[in-house]
Amino acid sequence: MPDIDFHKYIGIPYKMGGRGPGDYDCYGLIRHFMALDGIDIPDYRSPDDRRLVSHIFQSELRLWTKTEVRPGAIAVFRVPGMFHCAYMINAGEFVHTWEHSGGVCIEPLLNWTGRLVGIYEYTGH
C-alpha cells in the first residue's frame, strides 16, 4: 500500500456518482484509493436508485474475495436499503463517505461491526 495522506481527503463532499476530485460516493472513493495502489477495479456509476446500487454491488461481490482486516482491504457494510463500502487504512480504521457522514471521514471499524458484511480484496474473477 502506498503512503497516502488520508487526512487531505477529509471533508470532500459526498455526491452520488462522485468520482473525484471534488466529490465522491463510497465506491468512487475506494476506486480512487485502489488506483493509487495500482489496482484498477471496474467503475460502476452509482445510479440514483439505491436498490439498483445495492443489486449491482451484491452481484459484483463475486469479483472480490474475503480477506482479513488489513490496510488496503475493502470493508463492505449493510446500511438501510443498500450496501456501503470503505477503504481500510489500518486494522482498526477506515476512510469512507456517504450521505450521512458530511463528506469523507475516518471512522473506527468497531463503530460499524454490527453492519459489517465482510472484508474483501479485489480478485477480478
Image (cartoon, rainbow, N blue to C red):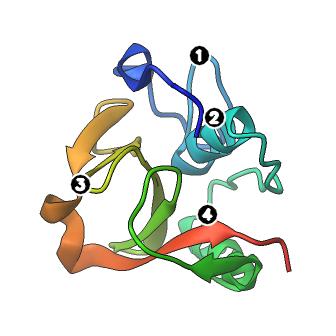
Q: Pick whichever, 66 or 99, lies toward us.
A: 66
Q: Nearer the viewer, residue 48 or 54?
A: 54
Do we see residue 55 in this rendering? Answer: no
Q: Earlier in the sequence, mark 4 or mark 2?
A: 2
Q: Which residue is mark 3?
A: 92
Horizontal and vertical percent position of residue 82: 46, 72
Judging by the rendered image, the residue that carries numbered circle 1 is 22
Report if residue 42 is visible in the image.
Answer: yes
Estimate the x, y position of residue 98 in percent, counting from the top left: 40, 45
Task: Count residues near mark 2 (Cα–Cα under 10 Å), then give few for <14, some for 14-19, many for 20+.
Answer: some
What is the distance, in whole Å, between disc 4 and disc 2 at their CAs? Answer: 15 Å
Numbered circle sitting on residue 49: 4
For image coordinates 69% across by 55% down, the residue present is 47
Tell me the element at label 1: loop
Separation of residues labelled 1 and 2 (CA atoms): 8 Å
Dots 3 and 4: beta carbons under 8 Å?
no
| Residue tagged 2 | 18
Are dots 1 and 2 in contact, CB under 8 Å? yes
Mark 4 against mark 2, which lies toward the viewer? 2
N-terminal of the two: label 3 or label 4? Answer: 4
Q: Earlier in the sequence, mark 3 or mark 2?
A: 2
Q: Give the number of marks.
A: 4
